[in-house]
Every structure is written in structure tokens, then in C-alpha cells.
Amino acid sequence: MDAFESRVSLSSDRTDAGVPDTNVPGEEPGLSDPIYARICQRIRSDILAGALAPGQRLKISDLTRRYGVSQMPIREALQQLQGEWLVTILPNRGASVRKVDEAFITQMYEIRGHLESLLTRRCAELATPTELQRLQELQAKYECVATTGNLAAIMTANRNLHRAIYEIARNPVGTELLDRHFGLLRSLRNIYGLGSSRLLSVSAEHRELMEAIGRHDGSRAEQISRRHCDSARDDLLERMRAASATP
Amino acid sequence: MDAFESRVSLSSDRTDAGVPDTNVPGEEPGLSDPIYARICQRIRSDILAGALAPGQRLKISDLTRRYGVSQMPIREALQQLQGEWLVTILPNRGASVRKVDEAFITQMYEIRGHLESLLTRRCAELATPTELQRLQELQAKYECVATTGNLAAIMTANRNLHRAIYEIARNPVGTELLDRHFGLLRSLRNIYGLGSSRLLSVSAEHRELMEAIGRHDGSRAEQISRRHCDSARDDLLERMRAASATP
DNA sequence: AAGTGGTCTAGACCACCTT
DNA sequence: AGGTGGTCTAGACCACTTA
């Protein structure tokens, strides 16, 4: 009676024969899973990278040419992505990359802030010494990468840290929800970048967070996490406004 | 005749950056939307009604016979339902109705409790007099129906009340999340029923909630809502244990 | 009325499990 | 190897939009 398989073991390439990794936003495309899953990954990264812009119409015929497969796997991929809120599908009217406005972003962050801070609280309550050490390592990694100014690397390090926190919270449902639906916010980050002052304060906030988690102080961790989200939101909205003011 | 005023603001589909309202779990199937959407509704209600049991394998060929359409619309429908967590799809291995265990339910309720209490707080903060009156009416309706013992009617009335609360909170993202993912819990209610003592306490909890919302007391409303979820969870788990003990 | 583009059907193809 | 059942292709069909 188990609804979840813990899928951490990236099976080694040869003779694997293991269960193929399900199509989770963060994972690499397994070499032998169906075309629609691989197309899904490709469209997803094209959206997240900003190659397919928010609001852009996604015509099946274009996509068949772009990715060299026929209609059906494209359609299936789009359905999956609709489940992640990256695209919107209107019956008989086709798909488009989800269009975002300020209200939508604010709402997303409000939800995300509450979910993430819940998981962060649980993380603080439940973390074992081994897990704490792992968090410290990931945090160190972030700090290290943050000095390089490489946006992609910074965001990966940041993501790894947050994912580790989720895992420690031992609530796969919440983790899946966050993984599934909030790639959209990441995609906006990829497009609009990160305020340079924000880079420093993120490090500072992470340090505070680590300290609270290390003390198993759940409510403090929750509080910091909430604030962390709020300032991420403010920073993003600010940059978006700036970008739309000076095109 | 039940109060089915379809009072969903049929959003003018004019480049609406908000949440798409096509094929939302609670709505009726439009007469002219595609087959896959209608199949999706039918499978969904069959799951919610318990006709397709948790864990049950969903073979495409069976479903084509059952619903009299060919493979592709079935596949599309299953993809959509995967997005709602009602079914799980493993690549090359097909779909099955999501299997649930106690840990899964506990996690679902934890997430749901936090989202719902957030929206309830916002509702208390934002409700206008007109909206308050509407809530009172829905609450009265619930009380009325509760005395009849008709489970389906009770659940509909309850759902209408909660949906009204969500709408007043003016966070369509949160509302969509709750609508999308928590039909599963409703389906379990349909299968396992409602403790008879629970019926009374639900009414009492609703009254408390209304009172707090009427006073625009956000934190009290949030707190009551959280408790409301927790007791719903306890009641459900209890009934499931009882059912599995005496088959 | 024609065109664009989403949706559906039938059957071939292929991955995985059984013998 | 054979069987079961998921996946893919090609083309017909049909909803909606333009002129």
C-alpha cells in the first residue's frame, strides 16, 4: 500500500532495467522513455530558458517541425505541461505559454510562501545531524557559486538547497506540489535575472535559515522562509517593472 | 431541485491571464467541447463515485470499450487526470487510479489545511456585506440539508460553501490548486461516508467560522479552518481503519 | 467560402512481461 | 518466442476564424 516510490537512485546507465524515472520537472530525460516525455522535457526547458516566451502561441504544426515528431506526442506533452501550469490549453483553440501578470505572480508567491514555509518548519523539526550537515554543504556550495556571478549555476545551487530542505520535511505531497507548479517562477527568474543586491541578501537569509534549522527552531525557520519568499517576490516584480519600463 | 445557479463568472476569454476555467473538476461538461474533455469528466466522476477503485489498473482498451471512443481521447483524459492526482501514469506501463495510504492522506490534509486556512483568512479580511450574506445563505442551506442524511446533497452543500469562501479570498491560483488536487479526498469521503457524530460538529464548526468571518477576524478564521481540516482528516482515517478492520 | 489549425480514428510499431 | 498493451504515424474530420 504505497503510493510513492522514492526515486532518488539515478540508475547507472548500463544494464539498468530499473523503473524508468517518471517525468519529474527536475530530472534528466531517461534514454528510453517515450517520445512525449522527452518532448515534454524539451518544451519545458525551452519555456524555462525563455526561448518560448510567456503568452506565445504554441501551434502544434510548428512544434512538430521544431521537434521532428508528429502531432500526438506533442499534444501529450502539452497536456503534461498544462498540469504544471507552464501552458494553458483552450479546447479547440490550442495551447500557449502561460501569460503572467502582476496579480498572478503575487498569488503564486503567496501560495508558494505558505507551502514552502510549512515544509521548512517541518524540516527544522525533523532534520537529523547527517541531514543538517548535508544542508551546510549545499549552503556552502551556494555561497561559493554566488561569487562567480554565473546565473544558471547560482539558480541550480539555490534549487538544490531548497529541494534538500523539502526532502527533509518528509512530505512528498507538498514537495511534488512545489516541484510541479512553481517552475514558472523559476522561468521568470531566468528571463529577468536577479537583482545584484538580492544576491547578497539571499546568502544572508540562507545563513539565518540554516541557523534556525540547526537549532530545530521550527517557527523561526518558518518565519524566515516566509520573508525569504516575500523578498524574492518583491525583487522579481521590481525587475519586471523595470524591464517593461525600458524595453 | 437543487440550487445549481452556475454562478461561476464565465470569464470573458479575452487574453485572460488568470486561471483557465475550462474543464475544472466541478463544472458541467459543455455540450460542444472535445471528446477528451467529456471523457475526462466521466472518468473523474467514476473515480470520485468509487466505481473505479483506488489502485485499480486503467487499461486503455477497457476504457475504449467502456466509453465507446478510441484510444487517443482516453489517453488525453488520463493525462489531465494525472494533473489532478487522481491517476498515476508510468511510461510504457499504463495508468491506474491513485493508490492511497495513511501517510499520503495525512500529507494531503496537511497541505490542504494550510492552503484552505490561508484562503479562509483572506476571505475574512476581504468579504463584503453582500458576500457575507451569501455565505450565510449557503451555510443555512448546509444546515438544512444536513438533517436529511442524504450524503451526496450534504457534500454538495458543503462544497458550495467552501468554494464560496475560496472565491471571496480572491486568489484564483490557490482556488485552482485546491480544486484540482483535492478531489481525491472528496472521492474517499464518497466511498467511506461521514461519521454521524461528525455531521453535527461540522455544523458547529461552520457556525463558528461564519461568526469569525463576519467579524473580519482573519486569524481566528484561519485557526478554525485549520482545526476543521484536522478533524475532517481524523474522521476519515478513523472510518477507513474501521472499514479495513471489518471488510 | 475558404483557410487555419485542433481533434479523432485506425492500424502499425514497439516496450515489457510471460512461457 | 509469443502476448499484452502502451505509443506513434498519417490522414480524415471538424470547430473556429477570416474575407
Image (cartoon, coloured by chain):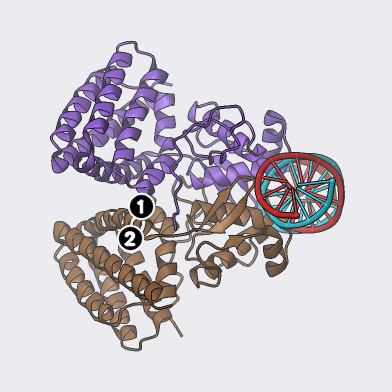
Chain colours: A purple, B brown, C red, D cyan
Residue matched to label 1: B174
Looking at the rendered structure, the secondary structure element under dot 1 is helix
Q: Amino acid at mark 1?
A: Gly
The disc labelled 2 sits on which kind of residue? Tyr
x and y, in percent, of residue B114 in the image: 27, 54
Residue B73 drawn above or below residue B148: above
Give percent across and percent down for residue B104. Answer: 38, 56
Q: Residue at x 55, y 72 (%)?
A: B51
Tell me which corner region of the image, top left, top right, bottom left or bottom right, holds residue A100.
top left
Along the line of sight, the residue nearer the viewer: A76 or A214: A214
Q: Outermost residue toward the bottom? A: B148
Q: Residues within 10 Å of mark 2 (few under 14, many from 20)?
A: many
Question: Pointer 1 indicates a residue of which chain?
Answer: B
The residue at the far top in this view is A148
List the residue tagged with mark 2: B166
Mark 1 Cα shell of 10 Å, populated few (<14), some (14-19), many (≥20)? many
Q: Which mark is residue A182?
A: none
- Residue A91 seen in the figure: no
Quadrant location, the N terminus of chain A: bottom left
Looking at the image, which residue is at 20% across and 39% down?
A124
